[in-house]
Amino acid sequence: MQETRLNRLIGRLLDRFINFLNNPWRQLSLIIIFLLLGYFLANVITTSAGQAGKWDVTIALLFLLFTEISSFIIYRRNNLSDKSPWIDLLNSLKIGFIYALYLEALKMGS
């Protein structure tokens, strides 16, 4: 790939972000933020999709695809020492997402 100023800028920004994530406290705070973001996204999507009632099956399929594809990405590596910070953030987002879906199911069942 040609080394342009835009490529160098994006490369530097990604390097800075990865260096930012090397601090354990910052990594923990981002993991918590992504956990809450997953919870928020699941609540917003289920609430807005449930209003019309026509998109229930389609939204359920999209939820299933998101969780299965993210699980495949997270758990496909055998060596856990090669795990990047992006994988941890995706896993945290998925956990918050699934937790919110279970809570919504409990609310609907009661």
Image (cartoon, rainbow, N blue to C red):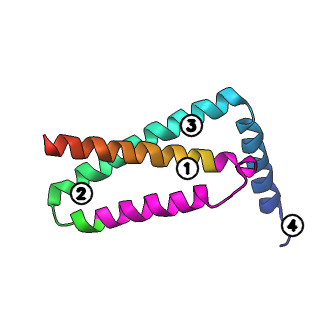
Name the N-terminal-most of marks 4 and 2.
4
Of the two numbered discs 2 and 3 in the rendering, the one whose residue sits closer to the viewer: 3
Mark pair 2, 3: CA separation: 27 Å
Q: Residue at x 30, y 45 (%)?
A: 102
How far from the left and from the top, in percent, is residue 87?
62, 50
Q: Amino acid at mark 1?
A: Leu
Under tag 3, what secondary structure? Answer: helix
How far from the left and from the top, in percent, is residue 79?
73, 53
Under tag 2, what secondary structure? Answer: helix
Q: Amino acid at mark 2?
A: Ala
Query: Which mark, by number, is residue 49?
Result: 2
Query: Which mark, by number, is residue 90?
Result: 1
Majority SS type along the magenta span: helix
Name the N-terminal-most of marks 1 and 4.
4
Left of 84 or right of it: where is 102?
left
Q: Amino acid at mark 3?
A: Ile
The one of 108 and 10 positioned closer to us in this rendering:
108
Of the two numbered discs 1 and 4 in the rendering, the one whose residue sits closer to the viewer: 1
Mark pair 1, 4: CA separation: 29 Å
Left of 89 or right of it: where is 40?
left
Mark pair 4, 2: CA separation: 44 Å
